[in-house]
Image (cartoon, rainbow, N blue to C red):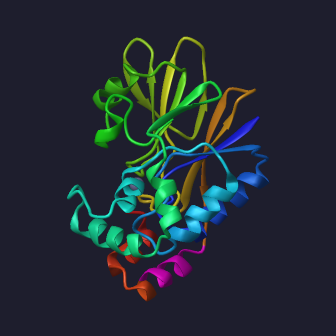
Amino acid sequence: MRFAIFSDVHANLEALEAVLEDAHEHHCTHFVCLGDVVGYNANPHECVKRVRDVDCPIVKGNHDEQASLIESSRDFNELAERAIQWTRDHLTAEDKMWLRDLRLQRAVRDFTIVHATLDTPARWGYVFNNLDAAASFTYQHTTVCFFGHTHIPMAFIRHDGVRRVSTELLRIETGKKYFINTGSVGQPRDGNWRAAYCIYDVENNIIEQRRVKYKVATAQNKIIKAGLPPLLAERLAIGR
Ligand code: ZN
């Protein structure tokens, strides 16, 4: 059983298709989405449809929530807000209903998935350091939990304290807990423009980080054509 675990697609259809293709090539049998299917990029409806077609377990992200509201709750910065207003106008009523009804956190097989944090998932806090991770670990009842939201791949282990480790290849050991950010498919922010996701090989207890090239120029052109802020196109090429 091999899970492809992906997060923060953010309406980037080119990146999503590239990740799904890579996952199939690497013999993934199951898929899991950590939320923020929409927001920022130019294909919100298409990405909702594609993720729904995959028919995988999914949790709600803050952009999914904002897109499904009639009016914003003033949580977003100006760039995100402009994009989310555009997004609302380009989703169907059914898309919004589907996004609105997503759960904040759930169990998949023997692991947990959440978009932001396990301690206060509805508050959309960010996990960047050991202290942030420690708060989530308090509420983590499974060995492994996957999260997203920061768009930066990182992993924390709790075993006699919490420490951050490299995400490239993780071997899951008994007696330890793992809180793992898969990075972002549609808007990476770690200085690497390639789409990020993880493969969880359950039988072999291995989690592997993958980066996938996609047609970034196509995604950028769509953003410009849609009249979305040009900065949203520029950042894709530099992974910021
Ligand atoms: Zn996001």
Label count reads 0
Q: Residue furthest bottom?
A: 225
Q: Is residue 190 visible?
A: no
Q: Quadrant of the C terminus?
A: bottom left
Closer-to-camera residue (159/228): 228
Is residue 89 placed above or below 21 in the rendered structure? below
Range of residues picked out in magenta: 215-223
Q: Quadrant of residue 121?
A: top left
Closer-to-camera residue (49/150): 49
> Which residue sits at x=37%, y=73%?
232
Q: Is residue 219 magenta?
A: yes
Q: Is residue 137 visible?
A: yes
Q: Can you give x and y, in whole percent of width and height, for residue 2 in the image?
A: 73, 38
Q: Quadrant of the N terminus?
A: top right
Ligand 1, seen in the image, is in the quarter at bottom left
Is residue 174 placed above or below 11 in the rendered structure? above
Closer-to-camera residue (46/170): 46
Chief SS of the magenta region: helix
Is residue 183 placed above or below 226 in the rendered structure? above
Q: Is residue 164 magenta?
A: no
> Which residue sits at x=61%, y=64%?
49
> Which residue sits at x=28%, y=40%?
123
Q: Can you give x and y, in whole percent of width and height, for residue 32 in the image?
A: 61, 44
Q: Can you give x and y, in whole percent of width and height, for residue 137 in the image?
A: 40, 22
Left or right for 92, reference 227: right
